[in-house]
């Protein structure tokens, strides 16, 4: 969506919350949470409003670098997209910091729409993605991207991302890369700055028990990217988290002991290197274009995602 206006994904991928409870059993309140006061069983909003709860579920997701962290106000999103699309279109040389799934897809998309643009990935590991995935899978992406002309620098970092216009950047190991656009793609961070310290581990993820109750409070649950669990942070995990949380919230409200436990999820990833060129991993097996296209397809699963919010 940030690379080009082709397919106008912003018209379908950004979904309002007004149909989330079509049968009227719930309501949606939009606001910025600035605190949780567990002793008072209240959530504190930026405007000073306090929302009381019997059971609280934390699912605040990740915070991303500027390019991926869309503005909170919907009317600012078109300008945000136009800005970054313009930056990418005009750039002669792009450096992507981070060779995970986001960095790989970004590199592939830029080369797909702007094949003359020089693209460099700086990645801190010895192969793209990370060690969760088979070496064969990681090397396949290297082959596809280098065939498109993408340069990959391994085992190196860019510690300080400069703001504003640039002409070059220097890596931690001292390599200078000529570039006029830098895209940080080193992953999201847990959106937990509003939580008290006793909720969090040293990396600011929420400490949870197998019941997905927080370590500190029986009546507060957590799910999604913010939980301290040894797994890849992906939207695909959310359904498994939600199933456990829903059963246990019901138990707490009924005065019963929560018994549903989260045992982890299988690792599935589908990544494109541009257009219909996909690779996927499921149950440790590597699948080529046909499998990934079958699952992710041309619509990028947007219709399925819209369905979660009761939109067609």
Image: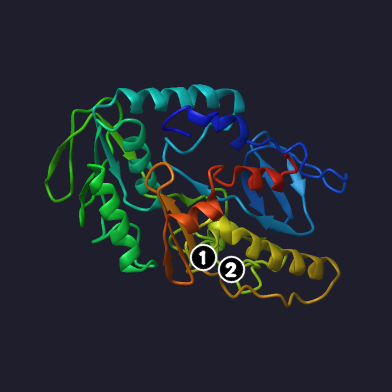
Q: Residue at x 20, y 53 (%)?
A: 156
Crowding at label 1, few (<14), some or many (≥20) Cα neighbours within 10 Å? many
Task: Identify the mark at residue 208; answer none if there is no mark.
Answer: 2
Q: Residue at x 34, y 25 (%)?
A: 89
Question: In screen coordinates, is 260 left or right of 262?
Answer: right
Secondary structure under badge 2?
Answer: loop
The picture quadrant where one finds residue 130 is bottom left
Residue 133 in picture, x, y percent from top left = 38, 66
Q: Are marks 2 and 1 in contact (CB under 8 Å)?
A: yes
Label 2 vs 1, first from the N-terminus: 2
Task: Identify the mark at residue 62; answer none if there is no mark.
Answer: none
Q: Which is more toward the observer, 96 or 73?
A: 96
Residue 91 in picture, x, y percent from top left = 28, 26
Q: Which is more toward the observer, 185 or 66?
A: 185
Secondary structure under badge 1?
Answer: loop
Residue 202 in picture, x, y percent from top left = 43, 62
**Location of mark 1 (residue):** 228
């Amino acid at each position: 969506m940030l690379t080009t206006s082709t397919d106008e994904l912003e018209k379908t991928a950004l979904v309002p919350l007004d149909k989330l409870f079509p049968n009227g059993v719930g309501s949606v309140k939009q606001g910025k949470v600035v605190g949780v006061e567990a002793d008072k069983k209240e959530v504190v909003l930026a405007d000073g409003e306090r929302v009381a709860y019997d059971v609280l579920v934390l699912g605040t997701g990740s915070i991303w670098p500027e390019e991926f962290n869309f503005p909170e106000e919907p009317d600012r999103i078109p300008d945000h997209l136009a800005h970054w699309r313009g930056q990418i279109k005009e750039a002669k040389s792009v450096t992507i910091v981070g060779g995970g799934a986001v960095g790989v897809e970004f590199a592939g998309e830029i080369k797909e729409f702007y094949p003359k643009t020089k693209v460099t990935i700086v990645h801190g590991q010895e192969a793209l993605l990370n060690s969760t995935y088979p070496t064969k899978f990681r090397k396949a992406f290297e082959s596809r991207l280098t065939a498109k002309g993408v340069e990959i620098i391994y085992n190196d970092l860019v510690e300080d991302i400069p703001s504003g216009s640039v002409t070059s950047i220097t890596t931690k190991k001292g390599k200078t890369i000529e570039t006029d656009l830098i895209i940080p793609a080193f992953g999201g961070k847990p959106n937990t700055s509003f939580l008290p310290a006793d909720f969090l581990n040293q990396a600011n993820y929420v400490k949870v028990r197998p019941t997905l109750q927080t370590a500190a409070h029986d009546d507060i649950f957590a799910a999604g990217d913010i939980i301290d669990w040894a797994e890849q942070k992906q939207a695909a995990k959310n359904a498994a988290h939600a199933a456990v949380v829903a059963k246990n919230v019901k138990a707490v409200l009924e005065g019963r002991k929560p018994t549903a436990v989260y045992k982890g999820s299988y690792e599935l990833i589908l990544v494109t290197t541009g257009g219909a060129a996909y690779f996927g991993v499921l149950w440790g097996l590597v699948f080529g274009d046909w499998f990934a296209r079958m699952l992710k397809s041309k619509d990028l699963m947007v219709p399925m995602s819209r369905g979660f919010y009761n939109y067609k």
